[in-house]
Amino acid sequence: MDIKILGKGCPKCKALERNTEEALKELGISANIEKVQDIDKIMEYDIMFTPALVVNGKVKVSGKVATKDEIKKILQEYI
């Protein structure tokens, strides 16, 4: 599973990353988490607001910090 956190490193981006790591741990899933901070690369995903969560190339959350439980539901689609 390939996960990307899109954002410039603001507190909301860090919170989304933390929630994602906790969700993965609770589900017992191994995944590569990449932080994408380059604005040109972020724009390739056609989002208006960060932070954003991308799973296997698909934007799943944009413009908000998803809760751990929301992220768990998203990740369960891929297991």
Image: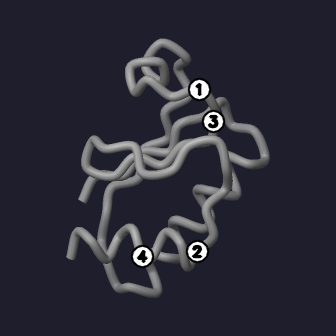
Vertical position of residue 10 compared to residue 41: above or below: below
> Quick one: label 2, few (<14), some, or many (20+) residues within 10 Å?
many
Query: Residue 57's image quarter?
Result: top left
Vertical position of residue 62 compared to residue 45: above or below: below
Inspect the image, locate mark 3, and give the three-letter code of the amino acid beneath it. Answer: Thr
Q: Residue at x 52, y 20 (%)?
A: 38
Vertical position of residue 32 compared to residue 79: above or below: above
> Quick one: label 1, few (<14), some, or many (20+) residues within 10 Å?
few
Q: Is residue 2 left or right of residue 54?
A: left
Q: CA distance from mark 2 to mark 3?
A: 17 Å
Instruction: From the image, tell me which residue sits under label 1.
Output: 48
Q: How many marks?
A: 4
Query: Residue 30's image quarter?
Result: bottom left
Inspect the image, locate mark 4, and give the three-letter code of the amino acid beneath it. Answer: Lys
Instruction: From the image, tell me which residue sits under label 3.
Output: 50
Spot occupied by residue 67 in the image (x, y as percentages of width and height): 63, 70
Q: Earlier in the sequence, mark 4 or mark 3?
A: 3
Instruction: From the image, tell me which residue sits under label 2.
Output: 68
Instruction: From the image, tell me which residue sits under label 4.
Output: 73
Q: Residue at x 44, y 23 (%)?
A: 46
Q: Secondary structure at mark 1?
A: loop
Q: Secondary structure at mark 3?
A: loop
